[in-house]
Image (spheres, helix red, strand yellow):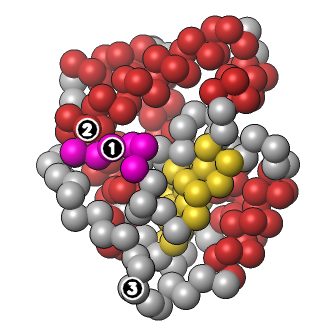
């Protein structure tokens, strides 16, 4: 089974994906880790690489191609990234979207990256706006369209364990064999 976990920066997707993969005994593949590795390899911050990606579409396309290949080739994976639900396409068995208000996400990022909340808020907003623009331009994806997800969850007032419990409970009762009600992702242009 392929499970995707998507959401904006600071929504808890990495924590949830790692916990879910461990609970299911699946492999965890993080798009964020790949992106941060690419940034570090180039001597850039993720925000700087995001800005560069506005001019060099190959950065996003390479990351997205890797996600698509993982979805096509592997089983028993929790694939996690902002676009994982979209990039996995018809290969995804269960798609999760996690979110929280910007103020909460900025606090989490500030704590994680040891920076001020104000700076984290500014960078997170800029990063989100930059990514949304590119997703629409490259693939015709409206990141705010949540209809493709099987579960959309506000993580603001849930502990990481609470998020995991909600996702696991929903997944356990979800009929992954049925395509009825499954939202198509056929409006996406996969041009890598």
Q: Position of residue 152 (x, y in %)?
A: 58, 57
Whether the residues at callouts 3 and 2 have beta carbons within 8 Å, the answer is no
Q: Which residue is mark 1?
A: 142
Majority SS type along the magenta span: loop
How far, Cα to Cα, is label 3 from label 2? Answer: 26 Å
Of callouts 1 and 3, the N-terminal one = 1
Earlier in the chain: of badge 2 and badge 1, it is 2
Q: Residues within 10 Å of mark 1 (few under 14, many from 20)?
A: some
Residue drawn at (65%, 54%) of the image = 153
Where disc 3 sits, the SS reads loop
Q: Is residue 69 visible?
A: no
| Residue in the picture at 52% in, 51% down | 6
Disc 2 + disc 1, Cβ < 8 Å:
yes
Residue 114 in the magenta stretch? The answer is no
In the picture, measured across the screen, residue 45 lies left or right of residue 55, that is right
Identify the mark at residue 179; answer none if there is no mark: 3
Name the element at disc 1: loop
* Mark 3: few/some/many CA within 10 Å (<14, 14-19, 20+): few
Q: Which disc, if any, is residue 136?
A: 2
Residue 15, position as x, y percentages in the image? 71, 48
Side of 39 where 189 appears, left or right: left
Asked if residue 149 is positioned above or below residue 173 in the image, the reply reads above
The span picked out in magenta is 140-145
Compared with 129, 171 (above or below) is below
Q: Are marks 1 and 3 in contact (CB under 8 Å)?
A: no
Is residue 144 part of the magenta span, yes or no?
yes
Real-space CA distance between mark 1 and mark 3, rounded to the nearest whole angstrom: 23 Å
Measured as percent of width and height from the top left, residue 41 is found at: 43, 24
Label drawn at residue 56: none
| Apparent side of residue 105 relative to residue 183 in the rendered image (left or right) | right
Say left or right for 1 vs 171: left
Q: Is residue 17 above or below residue 31?
A: below
């Amino acid at each position: 089974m392929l499970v995707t976990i998507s959401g904006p920066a600071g929504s808890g997707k990495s924590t949830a994906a790692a916990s879910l993969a461990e609970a299911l005994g699946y492999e965890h593949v993080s798009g964020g880790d790949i992106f941060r590795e690419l940034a570090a390899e180039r001597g850039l911050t993720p925000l700087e690489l995001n800005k560069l990606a506005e001019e060099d579409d190959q950065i996003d396309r390479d990351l997205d191609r890797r996600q698509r290949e993982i979805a096509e080739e592997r089983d028993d994976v929790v694939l996690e990234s902002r676009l994982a639900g979209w990039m996995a396409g018809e290969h995804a068995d269960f798609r999760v979207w996690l979110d929280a208000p910007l103020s909460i996400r900025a606090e989490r990022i500030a704590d994680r990256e040891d920076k001020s909340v104000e700076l984290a808020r500014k960078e997170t907003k800029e990063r989100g706006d930059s990514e949304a623009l590119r997703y629409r331009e490259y693939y015709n994806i409206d990141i705010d369209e949540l209809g493709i997800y099987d579960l959309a969850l506000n993580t603001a007032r849930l502990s990481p364990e609470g998020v995991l419990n909600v996702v696991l409970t929903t997944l356990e009762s979800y009929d992954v064999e049925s395509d009825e009600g499954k939202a198509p992702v056929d409006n996406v242009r996969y041009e890598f």
